[in-house]
Amino acid sequence: MTGARDPAAAEPAPASNAGTGLAGAGTAGTGRLSFGDVRELRGPLVVLGDVENVGWDEFATIELTHTDLSDTARTDRHGLVLEVDHDIVTLQVLEGTDNMAPGSIRVCFAGQPLQIPVSTGWLGRVCNGRGEPLDGGPPVTGATSLPVSGWPLNPVHREPPQEPVLTGVSVIDALTTLVRGQKLPIFSVAGLPHLTLATQIAAQATSGDTSFRVVFAAMGLTHADIAYVRDRLEQRSAAGELVLLLNAADDPVIERILTPRIALTIAEHLAYTEGNDVLVIMSDMTSYAEAVREVSAARREIPARRGYPGYLYSDLAGLYERCGRVRGRAGSVTIVPVLTMPGGDITHPVPDLTGYITEGQIVLSPEAYARGIYPPVDALSSLSRLMRSGAGAGRTREDHLDVAAQLLAALARAGQAGELAELVGADALSETDRSYLAYHQLVERNLFAQGRDEVRTLNDTLDRAWSALAALPRSELTMLSTDLLQKYLPPRSDAS
C-alpha cells in the first residue's frame, strides 16, 4: 500500500482525475511514462521490460495499436502494477488480456495509484465492479479523488462500537446484534439463501438515523442473481440511500479484486467526510478469494493452503479492517461480508481466516433450511462479540441481553431434549423436557422464521422471544430477573 494516511488527518487535496468514467482513467490518459517492451502475456497479467521510475500499485493505461483489431477490441484497457523487479514490471489488466498481442501494446503509467472520484453522487447509482455506470446515467463525478487501496486506520483514533444497526431480521437483531463499526460475516453453504438474506439486510437495515446509507458490492454473481439484487434493492436505490456495485461471474477476474476496494473507498468518504452511518455488504467473498488465488497462480507464486497465496490473511484483513468509527468524525463504516464455505467446511482457508479477523459470525444451517426456516440461521453457532456494546438499556431495550442469553440457554437444553426423545420417545420425557420441545417449535416458528420481505421492529422481535419463553416453566427462566419476568413474561397458555 502506498501513501498511507490517518483518516483523522486533514482531507486530501482535490485530484485532477475527478469526474472520469473509469476510476483513475483521467490521469492515466496523460501518463507521464510510456513503455512498449512487452515480454509476456500471462493470463490476466502483462510483463514489461526495460522499465524505470514505476512504483507498486501504480495505475496504467494499456493502448492497443494493432491494425487488425476491431474498434471495440482496440479500446484502451487499464492495469495496476503488481510487482517491480529491477526493470521488470508485472501489471494486472482489469479488463483481461483477450485480443492482446505483445507487439501491439504500449503502456502509459499515471504516476499514482488507482483513484476514484468520491462524492454523494454515488448514492442511487448502479455500476459494474470497476465503478462504470450500468444504469444508463453519466459517470460519477466528484471534486475529490481517493486511492482505492484506502488509508490504514490509526488504532489510536478508533472509537469503540457502541450503537446498534437493526436489520429488521429477528434472529439477527435478537441474538447476534450488529453494532456500528463492527465486521460481522455471514457463513453459508452453496444452495442456501445467503444472497436473499444479504439483500434483505441491505433493504431493511437502519441505525435509527436518517443518515444511514448502504453500499452493496456483489462479486462473481450470475446474471440472474444480479437481476434479483437490482430488483430487490430498487426502492432503496431510488431513495438515494444505496450504492450498488455489480461484478458478474463472466466479468474479468481482476475486476473482482477491485470491487470491494472501490466499495470501501466510497463508504469511507460517505462516513468520515459526509457523516453517514454506512453499511457495506460484500457477497461473495469466496469468489473474491478465488480471484486472488487465480492471480497468484498467474504470478507463479508458491501456493499455501489449498492453493491460496500465503498473504490471503493480510489481504482479507486489509479489507475488513477498513471499518470502524473515528474519533471526531460523526459517521461509521460497518461491514457484513458474505462467504460460502466449500463443502460446508468451516476450516476452509476463507472462512477460517475471516473468523480470525472479524468479530463473530452468523452461520446458516442446511438443517434449518430443510425444515423450511428462513432465514436458516444456526443460533447456537452464531455469535456477535460486540453485542454487549450495542444492546441493552439505553441502546436497544433493557431486557434484550438477558432475553438473548435465556433464549440460547433454552435452545441448548431443547437440543438435548430432542436427542433424548429420539432415543426413548417423547412420551417418556418429563414434563419439563416436553416443554423444551414445545419451546423449540415456538421459537423457530414465531421468532426465527420470517418472510423475505418482512420487516420486524425490535420491540416485536423481543415480544416474540418472550412468547416463546412462556412455553417453559417459570422456574426454568433462571437468567431473567424477577422484575423482567413480571414486566414482560406473558402467562403460559397451558397454565402449568
Image (cartoon, rainbow, N blue to C red):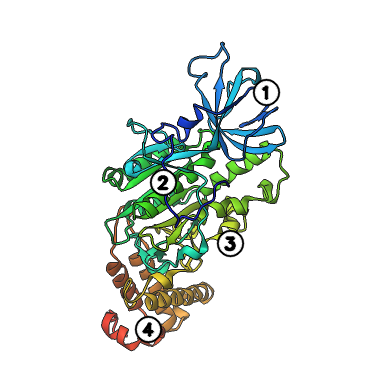
Q: Where is mark 4, residue-wise?
A: 480
State the SS at label 3. helix
Per the model, the C-alpha gap separating discs 3 and 2 is 25 Å
The answer to whether residue 193 is seen in the rendering is: no
Q: Where is mark 3, residue-wise?
A: 356
Per the model, the C-alpha gap separating discs 1 and 2 is 36 Å
Seen from the viewer's position, the closer of residues 413 and 14 is: 14
- Residue 116 vertical position relative to residue 195 in the rendered view, above or below: above
Please name the amino acid that badge 4 sits on: Leu
Q: Where is mark 2, residue-wise?
A: 266
Tell which tag, 1 or 4, sits nearer the viewer. 1
Seen from the viewer's position, the closer of residues 22 and 11 is: 11
State the SS at label 1. loop
- Which of the two discs, 1 and 3, labels the residue nearer the N terminus? 1
Mark 3 near mark 2, Cβ–Cβ under 8 Å? Answer: no
- Residue 44 vertical position relative to residue 426 in the rendered view, above or below: above
- Which of the two discs, 4 and 3, labels the residue nearer the N terminus? 3
Per the model, the C-alpha gap separating discs 1 and 4 is 73 Å
Mark 1 near mark 4, Cβ–Cβ under 8 Å? Answer: no
Seen from the viewer's position, the closer of residues 378 and 51 is: 51
